[in-house]
Image (cartoon, helix red, strand yellow):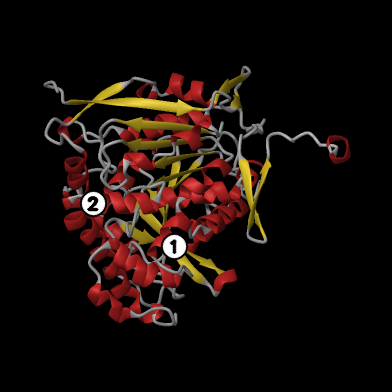
Amino acid sequence: MSYFGLRSFVHTQASPDSVQLPTKTGTESLAKLIAEEVPELREGAYDYLSPVLFNGDLQTLYAGAGNFENVNKIYYGRRIIAFPEESNSIVSADYLIPPPASKEEWTKLLAYSPLEKTPPYPARTRYLRPEEVAKYERTYTPEDKPLLVLLHGLSGGSHESYIRAVIDDIKSKFDCVVLNSRGCARTPITTPQLFCAIWTEDIRRFVQILHKEQPGRRIYLIGFSLGASILANYLGQQGDLARDDPANKIDGAIIVANPWDLAHSNQAMHSSYIGSHVYSPVMTKNLVRLLKNHKDVLAQNPNFDYEKRLSLKYIYDFDDAFTAPLFGFDSAKDYYRSASSVHRILGIRVPTVTINALDDPIVHKDCIPYKEAIKNPYILLATTSLGGHIGWFKRGNQLWYPPVITKIFSALDSIDHTKGVPKAPVSQAHRQLVDGRLQLQFLTEKAPEVDVKASA
C-alpha cells in the first residue's frame, strides 16, 4: 500500500486464436485491440484503489451502503414495453434523456403517464410521451451514435449508482437505455412472473424490438451481477444469431461481476460470516419487498405462496420458496445448477469482455471460467486483484470501471462494421444425451471413419 492507495493488478486471458476483427486497414484480434485501446486492461496493468476500502468486503459494503445520490445525476424517460406474445406482459425501459430546463418544466412533464395507476416515480424519471418514442423509430446510419443497453443487478434498476456512473461516462459517445427486470424500479407487472438468471426472453424480445424500430443501429449490451448472468446466458443461447442475424444482432458486450457458477457462488457467500449475516439477508429483504409490491398479480400463479415469505432468511430460502417453483425448477439448487451461465460461455459468438474482481465476496474467485474462456476466441477475460462486488473505488470516491467500460465499447465500435464479425472456430465438445446415454460429437473436427470389417 502507498499514499495513493492499494494497487489492484489486472490479469487478462484470451484464446490464442482470438477472433480477428475487421478494421479500416485490415484485421486485428480482439485481445490485441483491447490491449492497445484500453491500457487499464493490459496484462499486468495496475491502478490504485482506496486505501480505506482495503478489501473486497469493504468495497462491496460501501458500494451498497454509500450515499451516491448527488453524483451522476442521470435523467430518464421511461417507456413501457409490452410483449403481446405473452399475454401483454410488460417491462420498462429507461432511456437517457437531457435534464429539464427548469423545475417547472419537469413538473409539467411528470404529469403524463400511460398507466391508469402510476407507481411513485424513481428519482429523475418520467414517462416518455408517444411523440418522443416515435423519434427513436427511424433508420440509422454509421454516423449515428450506437445504442448501449444496460442490465442491472438483483432487484435493482436504472437508479443504481453503478448504472448511472457508467451512463454518465459514456453518454457523449453512446445513447443509453436500461432494461429494468420485471417488477423492478417501480414498474408494475401484469402477469404473475418476476425474473431470474436464466430468464432471457425479455432482453431477447427487447433487442428484436429495437432492431425493428431502429434498423441499421449498432447495439451493444452490458450486464452487472445478476444482469451479467442474464446477459451471458442470453448471448450463449443466441450463438450465431447474435452475430449474423440482423433481427438479433449484437455488436459487442461486457459482462461485469458475473456469478458464473450460481451454486458455487451461493455456497461461498454463505460460508463467510458477513455473507450469511449481511449480504444474503439484505438481498432476501429486497426480494421480499418485490413480492409485497406485486403480491396480488403474483397470486395468480398457483405455485406462488405468499405466506412462505415469513420463514425466509437467506437468498437460497427465497429461491427455494419462490424462484424455483415460479420458473419450473425442483429446488434452489436445481435452479442454480441449471441457470449458471458458465454452461453457455462457449456459445457466445460476439466480441465480449468479462471483468471480475478476485476479492469479490459475492462471486467467489473459483467460479471464474478461465478454461472455458480460453477456448472461446470471442471472449477476453479480465480479472482485477481488488475491487469487491462492483466496487472498484479509488481515492475521493472515483471509480475505476466507468472509463474502462467506455474505452472498451469505443474500441469495439471502432472496427469496420460493414464487414461484420467473422466466424471463428470454437473448440467445444458437444454433449448430447440420447436415451439417457452420453454421446460426444466434436464440433471442430471430424473423426476418421473406421472400416469395421477390415479391423475385425
Q: Which residue is disc 2 drawn over? A: 271
**Mark 2 or 1, nearer chain start:** 2
The image shows residue 314 at horizontal and vertical percentages of 25, 63
Of the pair 255 and 79, the residue shown nearer to us: 255
Residue type at mark 2: give it.
Ser
The image shows residue 37 at horizontal and vertical percentages of 44, 22
Placement of 402 over or under 122, stated as above or below: above
Placement of 184 over or under 363, stated as above or below: below
Horizontal arrangement in the rendering, residue 320 relative to residue 431 (left or right)? left
Horizontal arrangement in the rendering, residue 377 relative to residue 288 (left or right)? right
The image shows residue 114 at horizontal and vertical percentages of 43, 70
> Which residue is the extreme one toward the front?
456
The quarter of the image holding the N terminus is top left
Rendered residue at 59%/28% (across/down): 19
Marks 2,1: beta carbons within 8 A: no
Rendered residue at 61%/35% (across/down): 426
Point out which mark residue 15 bears. Answer: none
* Residue at disc 2, secondary structure: loop
* Residue at disc 1, secondary structure: helix
> Which residue is the extreme one toward the top?
25
The image shows residue 421 at horizontal and vertical percentages of 63, 33
Number of marks present in the image shown: 2
The quarter of the image holding the C terminus is top right
Q: Residues within 10 Å of mark 1 (few under 14, many from 20)?
A: some
Distance (Cα) linking label 2 and label 1: 20 Å
Residue 151 in view, yes or no:
no
Q: Which residue is disc 1 drawn over? A: 334
Q: Residues within 10 Å of mark 2 (few under 14, many from 20)?
A: few
Residue type at mark 1: give it.
Asp
Placement of 94 over or under 72, stated as above or below: below
Residue 3 in view, yes or no:
yes
